[in-house]
Amino acid sequence: MRIWKQPISIELLAAAAADTAITHLGIEFLEVGDDFIRGRVPVDRRTVQPYGLLHGGVALVLAETLGSCGAAFAAPAGHRTVGLDINANHLEPVHGLNGAAQALSRDGMQGAVRCP
């Protein structure tokens, strides 16, 4: 089932990310499906920790980027979305310069509303 309430494409996502941390880190949007966004971040000098592994914070930036973009385009026009919490477990290291890490974000809480 298609969840998008606004027009969405890789081109629109890339345009919205221009001149942000997303482009600084080299994050790319790869695919938009009916209920998901797939993206990747390069494993290079911008994104590794001193030990040559993908920095865990960068992995979270990728996850937050895909989740936030998905939420924004799944909301009706004129509505704003924000992330409240992110939690991650690093199950396997990503290493080797010139590689990439991929992620997929899929809706898990559509329709949930939090009021102060």
Image (tube, rainbow, N blue to C red):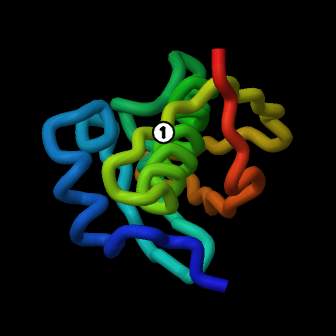
What residue is shown at x 30% (from left), y 31% (from top)? 21
Report whether residue 52 is seen.
Answer: no
Q: Is residue 11 left or right of residue 107?
A: left
Determine whether 45 is above or below 39 in the image: above
Q: Nearer the viewer, residue 18 or 84?
A: 84
Element type where label 1 sits in the image: loop
Q: Is residue 47 left or right of residue 2?
A: left
What residue is shown at x 59% (from left), y 21% (from top)? 51
Residue 69 is situated, as x and y percent measured from the top left of the image, at 44, 51
Determine whether 107 is above or below 49 in the image: below
Q: Nearer the viewer, residue 79 or 7?
A: 79
Q: Nearer the viewer, residue 110 or 42?
A: 110
- Residue type at mark 1? Thr
Can you say which quadrant of the picture contains the C terminus? top right
Determine whether 56 is above or below 103 in the image: above
Residue placed under numbered mark 1 in the picture: 81
Q: Nearer the viewer, residue 29 or 111?
A: 111
What residue is shown at x 69% (from left), y 60% (from top)? 107
Residue 46 is situated, as x and y percent measured from the top left of the image, at 35, 31
Determine whether 28 is above or below 47 in the image: below
Residue 32 is situated, as x and y percent measured from the top left of the image, at 47, 76
